Image (tube, rainbow, N blue to C red):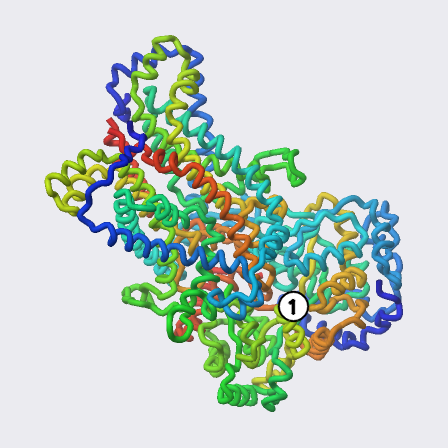
Amino acid sequence: MATSSIVTGKTKKSPIPRFILQTFLSLMAVIWLIPMVGALLSAFRNEQELRTNGVISFPRELTFQNFRDAFDRGEMGRKFLNTAFILVPSLFLILLFSSLVGFACTRFSGRFNVLFLVIFTAGNLMPQQVVFQPVFQIFKRIPWPDLLSDTNSGNLLGTKIGVIFIHVAFQTGFCTFVMSNYMKTLPKELTEAALVDGASVPRQFFTIVMPLCRPALAALGTLEFTWLYNDFFWGSVMLQKGVEKPITSSIAQLSGAFSTQDSLVAAASVIIAIPTIFVYFLLQKQFIGGLTLGASKG
Amino acid sequence: MSTVDRTAPRKGRRSRLQQLSFGDRVWLKFAIGIPLFVHLLLVWIPAIITAILSFMQWDNLAPVGDAQGVGFRNYWQIFTIFDPKLFPALFNNFLLIFWLGFCSAIGMLFAYLLDKNVKGGRFYQSVFYMPVVLSIAVVGFIWKAVMFQTDRGLLNKVLPGPGIDFLGNSDTVFSFHLPYLDSPIGLTKNFAALLVAMAWRHVGYVMVLYLAGLKGVDPTLREASAIDGANEVTAFRHVVFPTLKPINAVVAVITVIEALRAYDIIAALGTQRGTEVMGTLVTGSLTGEGGGRVGIGSAYGMVLFVLCIGFIIKYVISNFKDQG
Amino acid sequence: MSPNAERSPDPSDVGFAISRRQLIAGTAVTVAAGGVLAACGGSSSAPAADTTVAAPADTEAAPAETTAAPAETTPAVDTTVAAAAAADLGEVTFGSNYSDDKVKAAMAAAIAATGQKVKINTVDHNGYQDNFNTYIQQPDDVVSWFAGYRMRAFAGKGVVGDISDVWANLPDMSAGFKNASTGLDGKQYFVPFYFYPWAIHYRKSLFAEKGYEIPADWTALLALCAKMKADGITPFSAANDGGWPQMGMFDMINMRTNGYDFHVSLMGGKESWSDPKVAKVFENWKTILPFYQPDANSRKWEDGAAAWGKKETGMYLIGTFLASQFDPTKDPAAQEILDDIDFFAFPAIDPAHGQDAVEAPIDGFMMAKTPKNEAGAKALLAAIGSAAAIDGYLSVDPSVVAANSKANTSGYNALQKKSAELVGAAKQISQFLDRDTDPDFASKVVGPAIKDFLSGKDVAGILKTVEEQKATYTFE
């Protein structure tokens, strides 16, 4: 099977001496870690001290105060909710849409199937800023009584729903590409047998194909979670109310008109990074496995 | 009729579709139709509108009816008047393709080494991948304030000598003169600093893709080659690398597109001279307080789009050609 | 909060009478350049000299249904009384870019003093600016903004509301401020709140200790710089991260070299950047570059401030917000620096222009084109332009100077008093480079040009590029 990770427990014989390999990797890991550790250390430092002495200096005191301040002043509680409000439906719709398109285009013949896949794949690779002005104007013209929030302006502008739409539109492209490649690797007999048994197409989709796609969905879910969570562009150009903005905006919130406190920003950075790191560790196994994508088809 | 459809033997497919009930066929139409509608409405139609706007003059605060066709004037302006912005930006994107290509190779090396079941492999893997999951605002902060800062950044504390202005120094490392341009273009020192930050992020991303691919390599094959006495390099070249071919294609596209679309790290690390790329030019012109210069911004956007679309078409064709 | 006795009975006591006249002189030039002097002069009812309390100020701003007693015009202001007054106008939404802790609290105090029901939407300062273009297409009823070209550009595009009628209720704003709030069509679009000057900051103790004199002209400045350098002190803190801090230096040298009129005209797109006069500005600038902290381009202004605070550098051309970097609540040592801050006006270069011009950006408010609650929005604008509102603000953030001439100045600290004096003594007031010209031109053309200049690129080439690119912009 394409996805099952064929990691054998056996140690492969390797001509590269182990200790050289270990040393090299540890060295690289240290280099990779330095910036992150620097940020982490800054987060526990007193601002004034940090500004005077820099990160590499013996700390007079370590404090959690920065985290408390960053959370309060960055209004991070509210912003986490905003991000969740955008992220959860987006993620669900993206995975559903891309599975549907992948399923319909790879398991049933249709005149334009390849064309559809080309459209989705190419669209995903488009630079997002290029479409900003037209999307803005289109949203302005789509009436949308946004009763859920108090930013009701009568159209999609400034609503989190609008941000969900744009995420779904863009990310469905990439995920469709992955899902269609993945579904191609599933044995055709599976659905054919179901068809003979008289199972309807939606039934095949939900009960046979989707469960088999779990690894791919886990990988895509992890990737998309990271991307959507970290989205800065659409969240900041589309949402104009401070209280509506996603979590990524709280760092900007901590920077004032003229001044920025590095220790606070460092603490905010650490807080912001927690969910993505958590999700990565949670789904790590499926993630790597699922990433095999359609790549090892055949 | 279905010349495009090379996905399967035509006959079998045809007959299967005919077996579908009316309800099934409607369901399938919606399954494709709804996502397609959203995608076209918010991606492709806006892209086409941008293409049209690049031939017009329009202030985005004015009614749409005020837009006036100006022919190729916007393009003429960006290629002649704004050439000191455009060409260095294009050159930086060009450099990025090579640099990220190099980083992809490093990513592949990391993946290959990690695939050897080294002790603490999970740990290394997580460390290298961590920068990928960090938000760009966080990455920007880390490199700008923690690492590169002139007076107290980590790098300046560690390196001997006076503080190095990593992000502000737009002197060139190497440069050359294009006959068309007034000033030479080349790799600036601050862009070189950005390349380091970008490598930090790109390597892990590529590594994970290869790691996934390597899991698909049949271990017996490798063991066989080891028994045959093939050395590391030969085994890699003849056994591992060919199996990675599909991943290579994916990585190649990701690398090139990331290089062309590069925007976020560069924007996050400041808008210093010497670090402009197409992505920052487009964004700067289309958003921001002076977002009113839609025509010029769209023209920049189309230049970027045309560059990307070339790769996109090439990739998509090769991807869907060998589908059967 | 503030008893009547503390309220300054006559603004001239603190230099505002002078500043008023000279603000007129200053901004009149700006307006004359735009060719609508007559329109402005005609509509200006010169309420500034009127020191009598205009009692029913608020009620005129709002249509007839308003029964609000304009609490803030009665001398003994109590914000809670005011709060009860105008409540029945309904809720007004207010877009605020006052996002730092301190200014956020200060703004909340100001809003409380207006007594209106206001929903504040706070957005981080820089993001607010960056997204203003899209924000103003879906704005709150009342929005924060800046005076000058930057306001007129949006007024000219017809995306903000005419609030000329509100100005009937702002008797304590001088005519100079009124002109600074007037669009090209002669209507008012802006309510000023406060201003803060830019000047060369120094530490009194350092100057005393080393026997430095405040330089009155360029030669003296260069001599002082040389002396500092010999003493092992970097003469100037220099930062330019974000691209704006060094714009202040350009403004000052240009106004000292070529005069305010030329500066305004250059900013308005009416002069050529290839003019030898502009080249002269950079020539003069070059003479002090050796006295700059190195690598200005990527230094944040805060780091320049830190060096200045540690006496590593001797002088710093920056806004008076410099003081905000030294917060005694976070670092006890900061109090000493805070007590030690002083500043002087930028030295004269050409005697013909002396030290006439001062850069003092004005912050304030505009109204959306079609606010949901227009009556409420106009009432809020009138109320926030009142002395009570700015008093509320200054009680929390005393780093700026009130625009309202009736504001309580008795609580001003030494720096505020000096700021008021500096601006009062000025013959002309400029805003700031990115507020006096097309903001896109400022950030995408002039900003990069200054960065190029600082990194040692050829001035003639830079100016040629600026002039070429300027041609693609349409100035008002």
Residues B312 and B305: in front is B312
User: Looking at the picture, does residue B246 appear above or below residue B271?
Assistant: above
**Left-right relation of C5 to C244:** right
Image point (38%, 64%), residue name: B190
Count of labels shown?
1
User: Looking at the picture, does residue A229 appear above or below residue A26?
Assistant: above
Q: Residue B318, percent across and down?
A: 25, 36
**Left-right relation of C108 to B303:** right
Q: Residue A278, percent across and down?
A: 47, 42
- Quarter of the view holding residue A152: top right
Residues B251 and B26: in front is B251
Q: What amino acid does circle 1 point to?
A: Asp
Residue at the disc numbered 1: C327
- Quarter of the view holding residue C52: bottom right
In terms of secondary structure, where does tag 1 sit?
A: loop
Q: Residue A289, percent across and down?
A: 34, 34
